[in-house]
Amino acid sequence: MLDSNAPRFERLPNAPGVGYKPQHFSDILENPGPVAWLEIHAENYMGDGGRPLAQLRILAERFAISVHGVGLSIGGEGPLDPDHLARLKHLLGWLQPASFSEHLAWSTHDSHFLNDLLPLPYNAATLARVCDHIDRVQEVVGRRMLLENPSNYLAFAESDMAEVDFLAEIARRTGCGLLFDVNNVFVSATNQQTDPLGYIDAFPLDRVGEIHLGGHDEDMDETGAPLLIDSHGKPVVDPVWALYRHTIETGGAKPTLIEWDNDVPDWPVLMAEAQRAAPILQAALA
Amino acid sequence: MGGQTAFTRALLDPALAAPEGLVNPDGAPATKRFDVYRNNVAVSLIEALETGFPVICKLVGEAFFKAMAGIYLRRFPPTSQLMMFYGQDMPAFLTGFEPVQHLQYLPDVARLELALRACYHAADATPIAPETLQDMPADRLMAARFEFAPAMALIRSRWPVHGIWRMNMEDGAPQPGNAGENVLLTRPEYDPQLTTLAPGGGTFVAALMNGKAFGESLDAATAQVPDFDLTATLGVLFAGAAITRLNED
């Protein structure tokens, strides 16, 4: 059941948004530029009070908010953490954000939280488990969620499904939407030596409610093969912008987020990065 | 052993080989690729500890702190998704960590830094006005018990923890003294405030926090410090928006 108070913003606009950083609070209110919506990490707003929640209440009056969880461990072998699920339900309940999303990953095992998005094999058993977890999340929070495609650094020998098929089947079975991270597509395709365009063209873009764009680091594995690392600490690279353009031209305009979580730049730099998405979205909306 | 059990053990123990069944594009074992996850976990947790304990980090030096944090995170991996509270076991860890035994004040500085984070994220509360207390007849006031804002905390230390904290966090702060300090944390609006209480103030506030009546708390403070400055201590509490209710039985 949703709160009886109607949310101020029913959905994310098909426009640029940015990951909110507290150091940008005043800048965003004074000069948002093309930024029409903001994304927060759910876990950073699960304290009881103080400045984080006060700032969020002010921002939510002006901007559509996307709540992006990083700690639910939907891909975990164990059950979902009921305490964390309750915290999430509380946050989504009072905030009534325009969107809620989480990751195809795990981060908790045996009550240890590892603070990273860890990979899982793709097969019938993991598919059933992830679907059960998403059913449970959507039931508890009373809304549809979006699930994000991961950055992959390696593969599991025991996988027997393609990631695209795995995600599409999750969406079909649970009714959840998808969050399409174009940088993750590029990182994974480079690391696994596959074709990112093929991934995009096979992806159920009609299920996508939000797009992520971010920066990555470049490294090499012990064989000399390229190894890209999803670091969110740099501008979006041109090949990712090209894949993004292809995604929008194929699937239509989608709410598009610039993720910049490390070495966060001053507001004008972040705003300029968001501005780069605007004409691509406008062309698709025209 | 399940897949994620082996994965987790290998993540936290660099001496272990990468779990079996993880492959690179050629189908060969993905050793360095697994190290990306290992590195992400360690780096992110070390960063969380550096952010949470800036004064401990300055006191021991950044390189030492990072190495120590690497030991801490393997002994005490997070048990909650809320990274803003990670490090609750740091005072106990520092007490037993042999290389810092000569810095005996470190555990109390860590307690202060944990209390600051708790203060920052504590629930908002509405304080009472000083008049509420001033207008109360003396006999009723003596029997009254105080309720405090969730953001308020008291750190009682035999070390000058506030002085040490200031010297590392404030430009031009004086050298810390030698005496122990009772440090009150309050949050008048959104920024935590640290105040060293006058002699007897720690005993007074601790008694009130333990649910003792005003009169009984005052007696405890005066027994310890005959010229206990009640007005100054109440001034700190009101300036910190710390008193939320006076309860009369």
Image (cartoon, grey):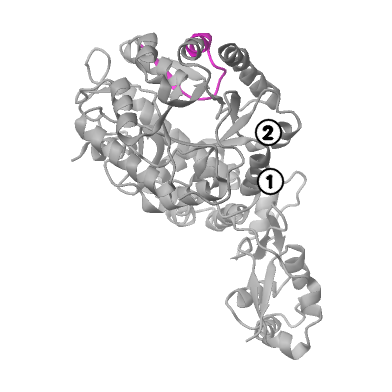
Q: Are marks 2 and 1 in contact (CB under 8 Å)?
A: no
Q: Callout 1 environment at 10 Å: few (<14), some (14 to 19), or many (20+)?
A: few
The answer to whether residue B181 is visible is yes
Q: Which residue occupies 76% across, 67% down?
A: B238
* Vertical relation: B146 (above or below) A254: below
Chain identifier of the residue bearing label 2 in the image = A
Q: Is residue B239 magenta?
A: no
The answer to whether residue B113 is visible is no
Chain identifier of the residue bearing label 1 in the image = B
Question: Could you say which is closer to the camera, residue B221 or residue A12?
Answer: A12
Residue A113 falls left or right of residue B196? left
Amino acid type for the residue under numbered disc 1: Met
The quadrant of the image that shows the C terminus of chain B is bottom right
Amino acid type for the residue under numbered disc 2: His
Residue A59 % position (x, y):
66, 40
The quadrant of the image that shows the N terminus of chain B is top left
Q: Which mark is residue A24?
A: 2
Q: Which mark is residue A90?
A: none
Specify the segment rendered in magenta: A226-244
Residue B48 % position (x, y):
51, 41
